Image (cartoon, grey):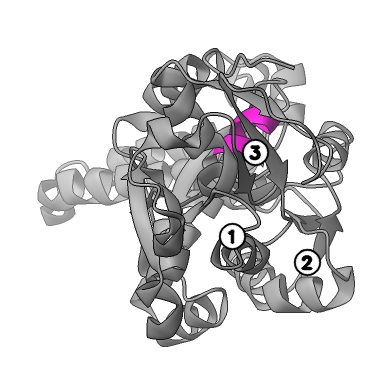
Amino acid sequence: MLPNVGTISGMEAGEVERCSPVTCGALMGFPVICWGLFRFRQTCEGTAVEKRLPCVYVAFLIVTLLLIAGPKTEAQVKQTVSIKALTLGVVYQSEPQPVAEHFRPLVEYAARKLAPTGEIKSSVIVANSVSQLIELVERAQVDFYLESPFPTYLINRTGTGRLLLRRWKGGMSEYRGVIFTSKASRITRLEDLRGKMIAFEDPGSTSGYFLPKLLLLEKRFQVAEKPDLSAKVLGGEIGYIFASTEKNVVKLVREERVAAGAISNDDYASLDETSKAGLAVLVESGSVPRHLVSVRRNLPEAVIKRLKEILLSMHQDDEGQKILRQTDGTTKFDTLPGGEETFRRKLNDLYHLRGEKK
């Protein structure tokens, strides 16, 4: 009589029914093979074959273990591709279609690596504001997103997303904010800005707004947003307006319509020599990571892990390098020094220093 297969390896009959076909085949066949080996040994007793039986047992054990371990790998592969679509989210206030096309090769590459057989569709969603991107992430319509540190903090503090990697945008791992003025203005120090107007880039800019504004607040200056350039600025404060782009900031400073402006150090370095010849840097802020990659929190953990591996190794193959170069001159993705929690705490500390006079 054969052993009862309903309690194979301590599994109840119902558990056997739920296991994978390969595992069930290996487990249910186990007692049959054992019975066959037992009869085979009885037949071989007293013969030369009996001396070779230990080798047979070892071979049988190896095959059985491989059969049982195999399905685990299969399950892991299925878990890795447990999504049907991969969507990248970015924030731009310009025409969305060209922006989507610009980032499409990046997300297509990631989706293809996640599922080489092409089971995962890829897409890019362009949000016109940080608040809209937050809504998209909350509704699971965006799986991962690229942003500078300040907008990333605003999104992730809601609990809908989490930091994944640093992006070397423009070949830079970190960048700073620069406050500069026109040499013709005879402004040589920050104290000279009291009672005057300066130009920031836009409310979502890390280097063209948040970092330089934070620097002023840390130095105990009062800063106040103004509706336009004609607004009155009190003697003890520094007024500011948003100029929308770094080009507009530079233009306003060169024309001395504002006392100073703020942009990123890489944007300042890229100015032509004629423009820089008439400008002077007053101060630079501390450095922060150039750009960040985040994922929605309810994305399957196996997908997050695999996506991280794909992006980290992207610069190591020719196709990946080409796509990175075409995507804002990105050099690579790497892990954030100090880890997610350290950087989250740093941004949280910075955010609480944003108080200002309205």
Front disc: 1 or 2: 1
Q: Could you say which quadrant of the image residue 301 lies in?
A: top right
Packing grade of label 1 (10 A; few <14, some 14-19, many >=20) is some
Looking at the figure, which quarter contains the C terminus?
A: top right
Where residue 209 appears, as percent x and y from the top left, is 58, 41
Using the image as rendered, state which of residue 64 and residue 106 is in the foreground.
106
Q: Secondary structure at mark 1?
A: loop
CB-based contact (under 8 Å), mark 1 and mark 2? no
Is 234 part of what is drawn in magenta?
no
Q: Quadrant of residue 304?
A: top right
Looking at numbered disc 1 in the image, what kind of residue is underneath it? Glu
Q: Amino acid at mark 2?
A: Ser
Residue 178: x and y in percent read 42, 50
Magenta region: which residues? 150-156
Q: Is residue 225 left or right of residue 139?
A: left
Q: Is residue 86 above or below residue 202?
A: below
Mark 1 or mark 2: name the one nearer the start of the chain: 2
Q: Pointer 1: what residue? A: 256
The amino acid type of the residue labelled 3 equals: Pro
Q: Which label sits on residue 122?
A: 2
- Relative side of 144 to 54, left or right: right
Q: Which mark is residue 151?
A: 3
Q: Earlier in the sequence, mark 2 or mark 3?
A: 2
Labels 2, 3: front one: 3
- For image coordinates 48% across by 61% down, the residue present is 310
